[in-house]
Image: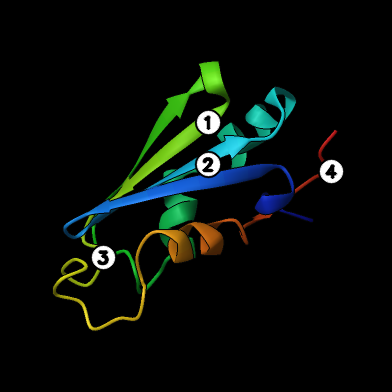
Amino acid sequence: MTKLREIAHSRTGDKGNTSNISVIAYEAKHYPLLLAQVTSARVKAHFAGVVEGEVVRYELPNISALNFVMTQTLGGGVTRSLALDAHGKSLSSALLDLEIEGEPR
């Protein structure tokens, strides 16, 4: 098993109660692994108890990236949530802990 962080990095953003996380392969050859294993369903399961809404995946093959838009995720948003930074970078770091099967080539 490989951690997602070994083959990709991420960027995040949030607006209100919606978070988006982009997962970008370090090398284009790893993009097929992202497509096959980093699905909307897997991301939602990975964030069980955090993401209460939908997880929609957008594919960006020209830059070997995926973007996930997750609704009802941030406890009402930055200004309404009592959570200590449940936004942005902490969610992207948590996603990079996702385990990927197989060895990256």
Distance, label 1 to label 3, CA atoms, is: 24 Å
Relative height, residue 70 to residue 50 (above, below): above
The mark nearer the N terminus, 2 or 4, is 2
| Secondary structure state at the residue bearing disc 4 | loop
Give the residue at the far bottom of this rendering: 82
**Label disc, if present, on residue 43 of the rendered structure:** none
Residue 95: percent from left, percent from top? 53, 58
For badge 1, the amino acid type reads Ala
Q: Residue at x 69, y 34 (%)?
A: 26
Q: Residue at x 48, y 34 (%)?
A: 66
Point out the image quarter for the C terminus: top right
In this view, the mark in front (2 or 4): 2
Distance, label 3 to label 4, CA atoms, is: 32 Å
Point out the image quarter for the N terminus: bottom right
**Label disc, if present, on residue 52 of the rendered structure:** 3
For badge 3, the amino acid type reads Glu
The mark nearer the N terminus, 4 or 1, is 1
Relative height, residue 9 to residue 2 (above, below): above
The mark nearer the N terminus, 2 or 1, is 2
Residue under label 1, please give it. Answer: 65
**Label disc, if present, on residue 103 of the rendered structure:** 4
Distance, label 2 to label 3, CA atoms, is: 21 Å
Distance, label 2 to label 4, CA atoms, is: 18 Å
* Residue 100 visible in image: no
The mark nearer the N terminus, 2 or 3, is 2
Relative height, residue 93 to residue 80 (above, below): above
Give the side of residue 33 with respect to residue 46, left or right.
Answer: right
Residue under label 2, please give it. Answer: 23
Distance, label 4 to label 1, CA atoms, is: 19 Å
Q: Residue at x 49, y 43 (%)?
A: 39
Relative height, residue 78 to residue 84 (above, below): above
Q: Are marks 2 and 4 in contact (CB under 8 Å)?
A: no
